[in-house]
Amino acid sequence: MTPTPLPYAKAPVVGEVNVPGSKSETNRALVLAALADGPSVLEGTLESRDTTLMMDALHALGVSIERNGASVRVNPPVRYTGAHSIDCGLAGTVMRFVPPIAMLADGATGFVGDPHASERPMGPLLDGLRQLGAVVTGDRLPFRISPPADYRASVSIDASGSSQFISGLLLIGARLPEGLTLRHTGKRLPSRPHIEMTTSMLRERGVQVAEPDDRTWRVSHGPIGAADTRIEPDLTNASVFLAAAAITGGSVTVPGWPARSLQPGAMFLDVVERMGATVTHGRGSVKVSGDGSLRGVDVDLTKASELTPVVAALGALAEGTTTISGVAHIRGHETDRLAALRTELHRVGCAAEETDDGLRITGSADLRPAILHAYADHRMAHFAALLALRVRGVGIDDIACTSKTMPRFPQDWAGLIG
């Protein structure tokens, strides 16, 4: 694959970027619309590989989906049909949200994915489906699911590896004959805001979800109401553009920023402000401004682990040490992100070490050019693009991987940097 040079910022980056819809919200809304008691229209949906994989997966199970740009009409079937082979790509939401729906189908369903997909943790979710009565062949992709002869209603799993294990089961809880009682047995639970997004979206559709304690959920049996929905911009993707302003001493505005959001990416504003940037909230927008200097921070990203690559890039260009904690589970993301970030930081001459649950990065003003590796991971490409703003001669071996959540990233990035 031919490496792609990444833009160097010859001047402070100034501009406005319209960020496409949230992947997390889009794929949850698609699943809930597919499980609903009538048709739904979703506006502002993300157009990307992950969301296309989700729509294709739901269609394979018998869901009718009509797409017109960012507007999608979803009509659930009378009964879901088994599918010979559903392609999950490298999308965690597809491989963890769709198999529970396959439990409701009239026959067996097979699941496959990209070459690296077999490295992503799946065991706790598949064990949960077995506890509900499904017959599951395999513990990682590829695997096959046959619906239960009798549905059970209680599941206990260790979701320390991914909050998506919890969300995937909660999404179908109301469709089970006796509802669902779900318990997390592990010591810690990452990305809890993503679970809160799931429960909030269920409640908005009339589903009763009780949380008797911080590791137990009870979903009552009943209909999932059809709901026309508008999707928020993806705040984690927005963080890449806002970080460009902090790094170069510029000013970047993202319109459509919600006043309140359950997206973990909203946490970026607090982090970048602590690192020395200025955050200004407008009416329906947010602006980040910088003076070109950044300071290292200690930051716990347990609730927003997908921000790790962006914060790591900021830390590499900051004065002092940045310690990122609470993100051990991202070793099981699209790639082992902690190992990948450490390796690529070393490649540009930045001192970085892995800890038990994160990274310790010593910033430097004397980084060297290099062709960085993306590991088929869109967030690693964002990381490289940020480093390139201050280090002339940085490139990436796979810019196309950004199509996972932001197909126009190369064009939008080049347009912003100039």
Image: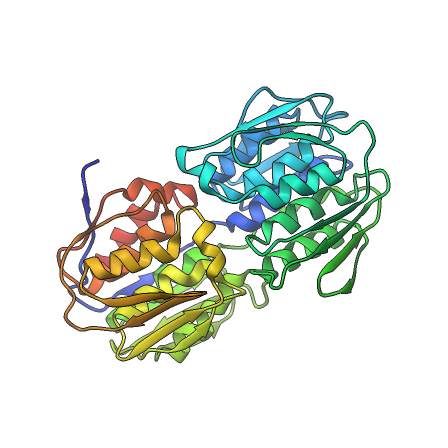
Image position, residue 386 (x, y; %):
28, 60
Query: Does the image show residue 43?
Result: no
Asked if residue 58 is positioned above or below residue 251 in the image, the reply reads above
Which quadrant of the view contains residue 274?
bottom left
Say whether residue 400 is left or right of residue 12.
right
Locate residue 246, reporting x and y percent.
31, 71
Q: Split into 4 quadrants, where in the image is the N terminus?
A: top left
24 relative to 52, above or below:
below
Q: Residue 235 placed where, x, y %?
A: 48, 59
Name the residue: 45% across, 68% down: 268
Closer to the camera, 357 or 76? 357
Q: Nearer the viewer, residue 341 or 357?
A: 357
Q: How is the image coloured?
A: rainbow
> Which residue is at the front of the view, 64 or 171?
171
Question: In which quadrant of the rendered image does the C terminus lie?
Answer: bottom left
Which residue is painted at 59% across and 54% down in the image? 163
> Is 383 left, or right, of 115 in this rendering?
left
The residue depicted at 47 percent of the width and 62 percent of the height is 327
User: On the picture, is 123 further left or further right than 227?
Assistant: left
Q: Where does the image place residue 222, in percent across and percent down from the top left? A: 84, 43
Q: Is residue 23 visible?
A: yes
Total of numbered circles in the picture? 0
